[in-house]
Image: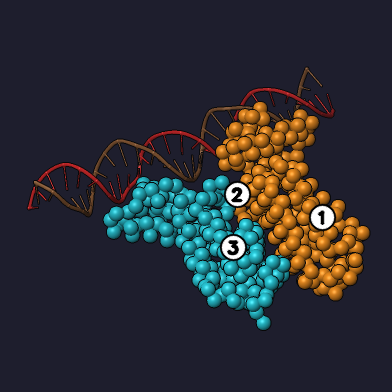
Chain colours: A orange, B cyan, C brown, D red
Amino acid sequence: MRRKPQQARSQARVEQILDVAEKLFQDIGYEAATTRAIAAHAEVSVGSLYQFFPDKEAILKALAVRYMQTQYQRFLDLHTAQSITLPLSSYVDRMIDVFDQFYTDYPGSRAIFEQLLDTITWSAIEKIDDFDYQVVTELARFFHSRQSSLPIAKCEHIALVITKTITELLWLSLSRDQEFRQELVAETKLMILSYLKQYLDEENNG
Amino acid sequence: MRRKPQQARSQARVEQILDVAEKLFQDIGYEAATTRAIAAHAEVSVGSLYQFFPDKEAILKALAVRYMQTQYQRFLDLHTAQSITLPLSSYVDRMIDVFDQFYTDYPGSRAIFEQLLDTITWSAIEKIDDFDYQVVTELARFFHSRQSSLPIAKCEHIALVITKTITELLWLSLSRDQEFRQELVAETKLMILSYLKQYLDEENNG
DNA sequence: ATACAATGTGAACAGTGTTCGCGTTTTCAA
DNA sequence: TTGAAAACGCGAACACTGTTCACATTGTAT
């Protein structure tokens, strides 16, 4: 955000721009949605648009961050103190359901993430894989709690592998029909579970 | 390719353009490498460039296809008749090594694939995931040969899951140092193996 | 009412991918 | 060898993009 809007009027404008941009990105795509078009639909001049966003990419990023914060919060909510005692299979079930459910609850997020992957240069992702990093760290801490004999460094590797795999496979599932998607979610669960069993034994469940 | 070059002279020009474009894409990136710059470095006019390639994207695609053909061939070579009798763990080892080795042998491919992911619109990939599809189909046939009790449809799901996972994790490994990369390759092998064991039993090895 | 800061504007700028009319070179039958 | 027809090569010109900036308008506080 180039300039923090100080008056109520301009705050509303930022929201207006974001809403219009999201709709346009989803309808005609990031490239086709020119800054002129976004400004016009938001009943704002290009100049005003650039007063709040340093460039076009920033608009897309802002939209993506909004979704990622929600996704991250849901993930955090799963990792309560009591979830450590959950059977491994139940835990894997719930964790993957969190991601699956997110895409169901926010179908619009798919298009935004898609455009983001298409557009953003791999090097300049900063804030975006900050979220990935936070998820990985949180997951690693959780694994270490379940199995303290496992070095934290190893836990981080495992967490990274799992995060990337789940993200990729659930992402893939979104491009198929409902039936295929459920099948893919089930396979993902099986894969993650059988992998985790190699490291986390299940002495703490029936 | 807009027009197939019919004279030897223009054939050489196409090669020249591809070589120059690859170097430019790797050095300064796809976006920064303007068609003017590519033409200039190849000592060719923009007009000539557009005589062979319908648009800028086609140049990148042509480069990517070149690498993918190599990768696919290596993958095919692994699946000989005798490899069906290989212990599952040895097979997984070799298969993942194929992908790992490819990136080692063709370090330039990384930049090209990266630019491709950044650039190409998700919908217009046609030829690109033709390769993915071929790998999945081949893999599914192989699994079905090993374990004919497993329905071919199920084999395809498993193959898809595995292909996507390996691609993603090895891709991730490329962005880290050598030590981390080896660690990640090892984790990938463990994950794929423990997953496959759920479906393919090992009655045919010691 | 006045001064000043915050905000809004859109023509203008610098750059892009792509086209197309026209000059040049190669081919090949007469 | 000759002469047209086809293939090839060229780069100024076109249409469009993201972005800026000098200026006009609005809001705030004295």
Q: Nearer the viewer, mark 3 or mark 2?
A: 3
Q: Are marks 1 and 2 in contact (CB under 8 Å)?
A: no
Q: Is residue B116 left or right of residue B10?
A: right
**Badge 1 amino acid:** Arg
Q: CA distance from mark 1 to mark 2?
A: 30 Å
Q: Crowdedness of circle 2 by 10 Å Cα count: few (<14), some, many (20+)?
A: many
Element assignment for label 3: helix
Marks 3 and 2 in Cβ contact (< 8 Å): no
Disc 1 designates what residue? A94
- The answer to whether one can see residue B181 in this image is no
Point out the tag, 1 or 2, that comes first from the N-terminus. Answer: 1
- The residue drawn where x is 56% and y is 46% is B123
Task: Estimate the x, y position of residue B75 in percent, counting from the top left.
Answer: 53, 68
Where, by quadrant of the figure, is residue B10 drawn? bottom left
Residue furthest front in the image: B149
How far is disc 3 from disc 2 in space, using C-alphas? 29 Å
Q: Where does the image place residue B95, in percent across and percent down from the top left?
A: 59, 71
Mark 1, other Cα within 10 Å: few <14 / some 14–19 / many ≥20: some
Residue under numbered circle 3: B140
Name which residue lies at 85% across and 54% down.
A78
The answer to which of B88 and B99 lies nearer the viewer is B88
For the residue marked with disc 3, what is the amino acid? Ala
Q: Mark 1 falls within which chain?
A: A
Q: Are marks 3 and 2 on the same chain?
A: no
Q: Chain of mark 3?
A: B
Image location (x, y in percent) of residue A80: 89, 57
Residue C18 vs residue A196, the one in the foreground: A196
Please indicate, yes or no, whether residue A38 appears anywhere in the rendered image: yes
Q: Point out residue B5 in the picture as x, y percentages from the top left corner.
A: 32, 54
Instruction: Give the labeled residue for mark 2.
Output: A118
* Chain under disc 2: A
